[in-house]
Amino acid sequence: MLARAIEETGLPTVAIALVKEHALRVKPPRALWAPFPFGFALGKPDDAAFQHKVIAAALGLLPEQAVPALAEFPEDADAPPLLLQASAAQAGAANREGDPADEVTALRGYYERWVEEHQGRTMVGLSGAPQRRFRGLVRWMQAFAAGDDAPYPDAPEGMAPARFLRLACDDLKAFFLEARLSRLPGESENDRQRWFWSETAMGSLIASAAARLVEQGDDRTAQGVAR
């Protein structure tokens, strides 16, 4: 959104996006999707040659006039395998006993206030699951984490289960964090992330779902789920 505002002044912009679906929804004028874990926007640390390739690919979009334009960086970053955005210590202290569905219910009022105050703008909605049905979505995720591979009954037709899980986790994280922003608008981003990964049952559930994906050999989706 900032990129569009800057473009209106006559300055061309390009962004690096780590979540393709977010870039598709926000539609910056030019964006390079880099399929790397959060924290590695240019790839592996200290790999200057690779990072220069990412920067060059992004800057190469500047002449593009047919906007919005979204390109995909064609290589993986070989970044360290990340299962949690939270630290190992935070993950160890995570809430394993609470019910994430009850957390959804408790936060719904804050989330809906956030949406109302922002004229309907929200990052929730990538999976297509209505937020008023998130309790059922949570139960499906719990079953998946426990070993049940049954697909979500209302997933978009033709969407692979792992992709739906990734988008559902993005929706739930956005729901929680936007609700938290409504409740505690002055809280820092670090504290907000620490709260989600360390103190909520939802953070624990998403970590468990990511661990199940790793067991299935889908490390890349696991990185996207739990970041």
Image (cartoon, rainbow, N blue to C red):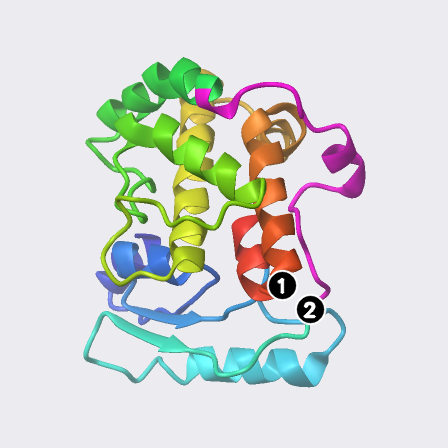
Badge 2, how many Cα within 10 Å: few under 14, some, many 20+?
A: some
Q: Is residue 85 magenta?
A: yes
Q: Quadrant of residue 27?
A: bottom left
- Where residue 124 appears, as percent x and y from the top left, is 33, 40
Q: Residue flagged by tag 2: what amino acid is it?
A: Ala
Question: In front: 83, or 47?
Answer: 83
Residue drawn where x is 57% and y is 42% of the image? 145
Of pointers 1 and 2, the one earlier in the residue sequence: 1
Residue at the spot of label 1: 40
Question: In front: 186, or 45?
Answer: 45
Residue drawn where x is 37% and y is 62% of the image? 160
- Where residue 140 appears, as percent x and y from the top left, is 43, 37
Q: Is residue 37 left or right of residue 72?
A: right
* Tags 1 and 2 touching, CB below 8 Å: yes
Question: In front: 22, or 83?
Answer: 83
Q: Residue flagged by tag 1: what amino acid is it?
A: Phe
Q: Secondary structure at mark 2?
A: loop
Q: Secondary structure at mark 1?
A: loop
User: Which mark, residue 126?
Assistant: none
Magenta-colored segment: predominant secondary structure? loop
Question: Residue reaching furthest right?
Answer: 89
Residue at the spot of label 2: 79
In the rendered image, the vertical position of residue 216 relative to residue 67, given as above or below? above
Q: Which residues are magenta?
A: 79-101
Residue drawn where x is 69% and y is 68% of the image? 79
- Where residue 73 appears, as percent x and y from the top left, is 47, 79
- Where residue 146 appears, as percent x and y from the top left, is 58, 40
Q: Is residue 94 magenta?
A: yes
Residue 38 seen in render: no
Residue 95 seen in render: yes
Badge 1, how many Cα within 10 Å: few under 14, some, many 20+?
A: some
